[in-house]
């Protein structure tokens, strides 16, 4: 423990509003370059911004969820710098009076619960996207992203290792998702983090920090933290100096490199934006946001365990994403079988999603109670819990519904999959198996109990997919006795 790592995070979350923060342009992803732009988000002279009310309400939601103080009179400032992706050479942000301040988020660590303090949350507009030519012949600009509303969540330097950082980011991502204010698709850049890292001897003043920009993968963030920690230690132990700079991470090479000297606040020449009046939040508006705050993931987990009697493990999987939680609630409500629904989702549904490379954020069906899939899965649960089909058939039909959207009742009828509960049919199947496998019967009665599994398999084979395994097991045990 010769060196101590000190980390602070700046997390940028793109908000899932329909329009941009200061104009009416669409925020939809994957459009043709420069097709979702207007004079406002392109920074044309004389164009005036108009604040999107939903952005303010989303910011208040997050601030309340993260135990922040809501600034009753906040304002916007201009952050001045020249870069090709900022067409008007300044970014509208908040410095002097951000909308949320002095919050915290608690995370689970190996040492127990740890409080990560949040310095502030502020609203700002996103920049455009610079697309570099792979052959090094230049770069192109796409301004569609200009004006996308962002919340920047700035933590205090309370992290000491990458595990704490990931725990915080996972909890923050979960909070953003269940507040329904950000889709958190890291692969699309809708949530990304800047890592401010320094090292020091325990008890000493903070060291010189570097900032690794625009990280959008938990795995890459972990690697970048470990790399930068070791790099700084090596520099200092060789007698060198750490310079305050902005660095870019190359995940393919597993290294980072310096981009530019890190700017200070005074370098940006902040001043109040003259085109946007101060934002005043009164009691009624704030209380309305508090009263309509969505149920968060940890609250859902507690409710599922308490009211539905499902396991803590299952509750954790179901609340990994809002889409999975919606699927669970809709199916369990219609089927009135929450435990069976939980088993279905944590078992077969998650397996099928993994096999299909379907991420939870891309799960579109099951999000409303009137979705056809909800009714089909609920019918299936009713069939298996009432003993009309066995578990093997149940899994087969779940997969058929998932992949081909089949009708469960028609599927069962056409393939003759209703469970065989006819005692005589099962007795005849057992007699036939014992007659055809005399050596195995002798082995079982001689003490080789493992043979029972083979005999049971032969009985189920004769009965077909609709065989009742519990009844068949009982009859076979009686016959062998």
Image (spheres, rainbow, N blue to C red):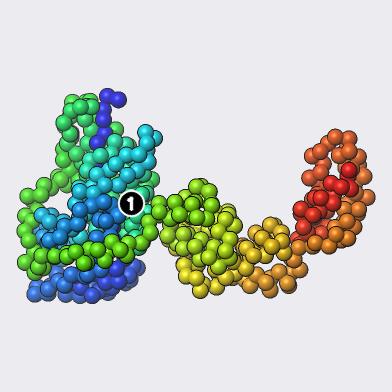
Residue 117 point in image, percent of width and height: 24, 44
Give the image quarter of residue 372.
bottom right
Give the image quarter of residue 334.
bottom right
x 32%, y 65%: residue:
292
Q: Which residue is mark 1?
A: 172
Residue 98 point in image, percent of width and height: 16, 56
x 20%, y 73%: residue:
23
* Number of numbered callouts drawn: 1
* Quadrant of image for the N terminus: top left
Q: Is residue 350 left or right of residue 389?
A: left
* Quadrant of image for the C terminus: top right
Give the image quarter of residue 75.
bottom left
Towards the viewer: 425 or 22: 425
Towards the viewer: 72 or 247: 72
x 71%, y 69%: residue:
412
Q: Is residue 80 visible?
A: yes
Secondary structure under tag 1 reads helix
Few, some or many residues within 10 Å of mark 1 (<14, 14–19, 20+): many
Q: Is residue 147 visible?
A: no
x 22%, y 43%: residue:
156
Towards the viewer: 248 or 206: 206
Residue 317 point in image, percent of width and height: 49, 52
Towards the viewer: 215 or 429: 429
Residue 246 point in image, percent of width and height: 20, 46
């Amino acid at each position: 423990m010769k060196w101590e790592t000190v980390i602070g995070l700046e997390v940028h979350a793109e908000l899932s509003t329909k329009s941009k923060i200061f104009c009416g342009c669409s925020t939809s992803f994957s459009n043709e370059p420069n097709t979702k732009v207007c004079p406002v988000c392109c920074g044309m002279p004389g164009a005036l911004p108009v604040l999107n009310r939903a952005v303010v309400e989303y910011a208040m939601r997050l601030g309340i969820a993260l135990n922040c103080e809501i600034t009753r009179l906040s304002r916007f400032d201009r952050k001045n710098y020249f870069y090709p992706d900022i067409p008007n050479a300044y970014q509208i942000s908040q410095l002097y009076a951000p909308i949320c301040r002095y919050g915290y988020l608690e995370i689970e660590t190996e040492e127990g619960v740890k409080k990560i303090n949040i310095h502030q949350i502020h609203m700002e507009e996103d920049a455009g996207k610079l697309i570099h030519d792979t052959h090094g012949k230049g770069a192109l600009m796409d301004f569609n992203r200009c004006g996308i509303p962002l919340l920047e969540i700035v933590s205090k330097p309370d992290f000491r290792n990458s595990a704490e950082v990931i725990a915080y980011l996972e909890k923050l991502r979960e909070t953003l998702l269940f507040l329904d204010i950000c889709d958190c698709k890291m692969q699309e850049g809708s949530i990304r983090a800047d890592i401010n890292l320094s090292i020091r001897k325990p008890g000493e003043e903070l060291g010189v920090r570097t900032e690794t920009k625009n990280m959008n993968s938990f795995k890459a963030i972990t690697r970048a933290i470990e790399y930068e920690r070791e790099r700084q230690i090596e520099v200092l132990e060789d007698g060198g100096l750490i310079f305050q700079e902005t660095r870019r991470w190359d995940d393919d090479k597993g290294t980072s490199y310096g981009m530019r000297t890190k700017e200070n606040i005074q370098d940006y020449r902040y001043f109040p934006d003259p085109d946007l009046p101060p934002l005043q939040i009164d009691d009624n508006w704030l209380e309305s946001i508090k009263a309509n705050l969505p149920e968060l993931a940890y609250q859902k987990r507690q409710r599922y365990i308490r009211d539905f009697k499902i396991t803590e493990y299952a509750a954790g999987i179901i609340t990994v994403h809002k889409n999975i939680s919606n699927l669970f609630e809709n199916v369990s409500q219609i089927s009135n079988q929450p435990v069976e629904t939980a088993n279905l989702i944590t078992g077969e549904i998650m397996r099928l999603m993994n096999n299909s490379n379907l991420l939870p954020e891309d799960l579109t069906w099951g999000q409303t109670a009137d979705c056809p899939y909800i009714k089909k899965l609920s019918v299936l649960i009713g069939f298996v819990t009432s003993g009309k089909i066995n578990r093997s058939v149940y899994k087969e039909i779940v997969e058929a519904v998932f992949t081909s959207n089949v009708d469960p009742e028609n599927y069962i009828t056409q393939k003759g999959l209703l469970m065989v509960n006819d005692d005589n049919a099962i007795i005849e199947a057992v007699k036939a198996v014992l007659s055809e496998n005399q050596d195995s019967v002798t082995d079982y009665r001689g003490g080789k109990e493992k043979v029972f599994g083979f005999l049971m398999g032969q009985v189920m084979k004769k009965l077909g997919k609709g065989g009742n395994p519990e009844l068949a097991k009982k009859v076979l045990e009686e016959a062998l006795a």
